Image (cartoon, rainbow, N blue to C red):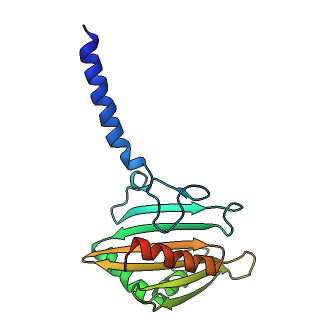
Amino acid sequence: MPFRPLRSCLLILTFGLTVASCGYIPRQVAGLPSGPPWEALPLRKWLAEDRAEPVALAFCAPPECGPGLAVSVVRLTGKDADITDAILRDPERLARALRSPAGREKPVKTRISVERLGEPPYPGFTIELAPADGSKHPAYGVALGRRSGGDLEVVLVIGEAPDAVRETAKEVAARELGS
């Protein structure tokens, strides 16, 4: 009966692979419809960066989803959480850094505008980025965050229409960050 130990090993191997692959199963972003046209990505195993822990990422591309949107939830800790929290409360710091050509041989001339969102309970901001020459449509973004001890969870939404970006960010933040 040499097949009996082989079956046991195969069962253990199958169980181990199933458990290990759970990190590749995407987590849907709360506050977004599940399933098509929204697609969730299994970020946890893709990013090896120690600075931020991706929690969830989903996107919806035209024509099924007009306008196109990308939504992510990220958890930061330590110094990165402190820096990001400061930017959420004072987004002009980010705008100044993006406008600065320091360290770039050929800086891209970009029109950047930010607006602080003072709507409780999440500090955050809106951002608009476009080529200074107006050759392309702007991209719009919203970042909202919430502290929990030393951690900072941030909802980021990027898209082509400012109203859709802002509304999606509010809906996702309410579900992902709580109240």
**Residue depicted at x 39% and y 55%:** 44
**Residue depicted at x 56% and y 66%:** 70
**Count of numbered labels shown in the rendering:** 0
**Residue 49 x/y as whole percent:** 37, 60
Vertical arrangement, residue 28 with respect to residue 4, above or below:
below
Vertical arrangement, residue 158 with respect to residue 22, above or below:
below
**Residue depicted at x 49% and y 55%:** 41
**Residue 3 x/y as whole percent:** 29, 12
**Residue 116 x/y as whole percent:** 49, 90
Which quadrant holds the C terminus? bottom left
Q: Nearer the viewer, residue 106 or 33?
A: 33
Question: Is residue 114 visible from the viewing direction of this image?
Answer: yes
In the image, is 74 to the left or to the right of 110?
left
**Residue 172 x/y as whole percent:** 48, 72
**Which quadrant holds residue 136?**
bottom right
Vertical arrangement, residue 101 with respect to residue 42, above or below:
below
Question: Is residue 103 visible from the viewing direction of this image?
Answer: no
In the image, is 176 to the left or to the right of 113?
left
Residue extending farthest to the top is 1
**Residue depicted at x 30% and y 27%:** 11
In the image, is 131 to the left or to the right of 173?
right
Which quadrant holds the N terminus? top left
